[in-house]
Image (cartoon, rainbow, N blue to C red):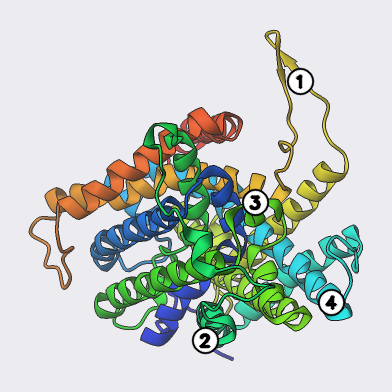
Amino acid sequence: MNAPTTHLPRVLGPWMAIAIVIGTVIGSGVFKKPNAVAKDVPDFALAMLAWALIGMLAMFGALALAEVATLFPKAGGNYVFLREGYGRLAGFLWGWVEFWIIRTGSIAALASIFSESVANAIREARGLPTGTDVIAFWPRQGMAVAVILALALVNVRGVRWGGLLQLGITAVKISSLIGVILLPFVVLGFVSEPQHPPRLANISPAWPADWSAVSWSGFGTALVGVYWAYHGWMNIAPIAEEVKTPQRNIPLALILGVGTIIVLYLGANFAYYLVLPRADIIKLGDTPVAAEFGSRLLGPIGGVLIACAIAVSVFGALNGNILVGPRLLYAMGEDGLAPRWLSRLHPKFQTPVAATMIMAAWSCGLVLIVALWLKNPLPTINLFDCKLNPNPPAGKSGFDVITDFAMFGAIGLETLAVASIFVFRTKLAATPRSYRCPGYPFVPAMYALVMSAVWLNMFANQSAESLVGLGFMVVGAGLYGVFLRRKP
């Protein structure tokens, strides 16, 4: 029998590290979020600008966070950076929101999208019309719960198992997105045919004819939606303690991973607009734009292929989140900011088994809570003569609501984590660094300023989600002050 260990083993090589960055980012966002962006942004060039801007900001953030992560190559990621940079309260608040909303909300949303994608693939294969329920509502929720628990067990078995699974799925999803990018050129080109209007007409005029009519608030809302599609590029940091040669492999994974994602996202969105006019994208509602894209180019087989690609992509992102997420609870357990037993490792597999199963259990709980909420809408609340509707707005799915709640906490606290580079340049000025952020201080400052503006814009356009998220953080701060402030 293997002797118990108190440290996570370094078993993840550079390719697995890159696969974790790419694989946890590319999920459902690039297939579903273009619909929401088209609603908020009226012009092709502005829509592409939204994807490019957030991609550039993600790269700026990656360049800065790589320096911080190589200073603290430990389990926990942002929790460690915020704790070391701003104090234990900041670290606890990240853990509080990350566990209850951000990470588990993302896992729940991805699992729900996975079950929907499987149902869509079956429907497309059977040639049934859009909206046909081939898998009933509650069996779909059961499938979402089952896939979360199954992947949790895989990752309990060993981080190498989870990493190898991530590497294989990431290779498949990259290939599928390259196929999406090339498909319009291979199948149709730019030739006008009676059944296919000129492709360039879909992106013309590219820029707004009247800039005064552009809703910059709507553009900010679109940026939040795009940020969900890029969200997860930090996911190498929570698992840094298990990366081989972290001073080299963490910056490599962040820079190559984010760069690859930017190219794939811009290429896919360009391909969508070549085939689908903006008006058609908006009409799709909750139907992924990629599904309609595939159907128009290849007929029924295209819809099946895209539905399968979405299912595989979401499965990979789900596995990545279940792989890295429990390291937060492990690190907080070691520090005494969560129950100590969460930091115990399996004596054979050397994985945080309790932390993994607790995170999986709450993610399953969120799947079922949101499902009950959608099936049984809550009554309107009268508060100080104001009527508050606690249900998803018209035309907004439970998936979008979950991601909006998750993004509010994520944008604010993740921006602080990237900005911690300024703190450590002062506090740890004499500490040797194998990697330094290029373009410092401009690069991290631009990231912090733009993402702070996006975060503040949420108060104006998504006030309900913002206030709930802020209130949840206040509750966490209160609990810390009462129960944890004096603990060593």
Find the distance from the CA under tag 2 to the CA under tag 1: 48 Å
Q: Assess disc 1: are there few (<14), some (14-19) or many (≥20) residues with their C-alpha within 10 Å of its C-alpha.
A: few
Q: Nearer the viewer, mark 4 or mark 1?
A: 4
Find the distance from the CA under tag 3 to the CA under tag 2: 30 Å
Residue 171 circle label? 2
**In percent of the image, x 89 and y 59: which residue is there?**
138
Find the distance from the CA under tag 2 to the CA under tag 4: 23 Å
- Residue 137 placement (x, y as % from top left): 88, 58
Find the distance from the CA under tag 3 to the CA under tag 4: 24 Å
**Amino acid identity at mark 3:** Ile
219 vs 110, left or right, is left
Q: Earlier in the sequence, mark 4 or mark 1?
A: 4
**Amino acid identity at mark 1:** Ile
Q: Quadrant of the N terminus?
A: bottom right
Residue at the spot of label 3: 282
- Residue 165 placement (x, y as % from top left): 58, 85
Front residue of 370/291: it is 291
- Residue 13 placement (x, y as % from top left): 39, 86
436 vs 447, left or right, is left
Residue 474 seen by the camera: no
**Amino acid identity at mark 2:** Ala
Residue 122 circle label? 4
**Amino acid identity at mark 4:** Ile
Q: Say if 76 sits above or below 193 in the image.
A: above
